[in-house]
Every structure is written in C-alpha cells, then in structure tokens.
Image (spheres, grey):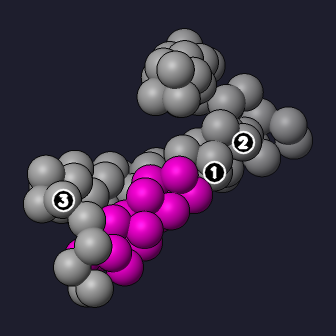
Amino acid sequence: MYIFVFGVGYYLVYKNPLEGLGLVIIGILMKLGFVTVVFGHYIFGSIPQMYVPFALLDVIFAVIFIMTYAPLKKLKAAAAA
C-alpha cells in the first residue's frame, strides 16, 4: 500500500508537474531514505541482497528527481510572476 500511495503521488506530478512540485521533494526524500537504510544495513551485513539492486535504481531515480526539481521550480516562479 505504501508503494501504491507513492505511485499515486508520482502520477499526480506527471499530470501537473508545476502543482506537484512539493511531491517531487517527497519523492527525493523517499528515494534517499530507502538508499540510506539499505546501504547502512548492507555495510553491517544485515539485509538480504535482493534489496541492493532496488537501492541502486533509487540512486538513479533520486538523481533524476533532483535534476528535474530545479527547472520545475524556475518554471513555477516564472509562471507566478
């Protein structure tokens, strides 16, 4: 259910990126949080290996989200002006 709720959030951003700018921040934090937890546990050997590829994908998605945030923020500021 947790993943489904975030999927709905991503869909809302897709439908209207300027209105969903706050959700982009939530997405960045979620991706970075998952990566931090997985790699923290990986260092201590206390997590199943199956989570590591998902964490690597989330690193890529976090970078994409961060690269997307700045232009969207500029567009939103320009639209408000």
Q: Which residues are magenta?
A: 28-42
Label 3: how many residues lie within 10 Å, few (<14), some (14-19) or many (20+)? few
Under circle 1, the secondary element is: helix
Can you name the residue that lies furthest to the right here?
A: 81
Q: Considering the whole magenta stretch, tell me its main secondary structure.
A: helix
Residues packed near mark 2 inside 10 Å, few (<14), some (14 to 19) or many (20 plus): few
**What residue did someone put label 1 on?**
25
Q: Position of residue 23 (x, y in %)?
A: 65, 38
Determine whether label 1 and label 3 are within 8 Å by CB.
no
Q: Secondary structure at mark 2?
A: helix
Q: Nearer the viewer, residue 23 or 19?
A: 23
Say which residue appears at 72% left-offset and 42% top-offset.
22
Quarter of the image with the C terminus in it: top right
Earlier residue among tags 2 and 3: 2
Measuring 25% from the left and 65% from the top, which residue is drawn there? 47
Mark seen at residue 48 = 3
What is the distance, in whole Å, between disc 1 and disc 3 at their CAs?
28 Å
The reply to whether the C-beta atoms of the residues labelled 2 and 1 are less than 8 Å apart is yes
Q: Is 32 contained in the magenta span?
A: yes
Q: On residue 22, which mark appears?
A: 2
Q: Classify 10 Å Cα crowding around label 1: few (below 14), some (14-19), many (20 and above).
A: some
The answer to whether mark 2 and mark 3 are in CB contact below 8 A is no
In percent of width and height, residue 59 lies at 30, 62
Look at label 1 and name its amino acid: Ile
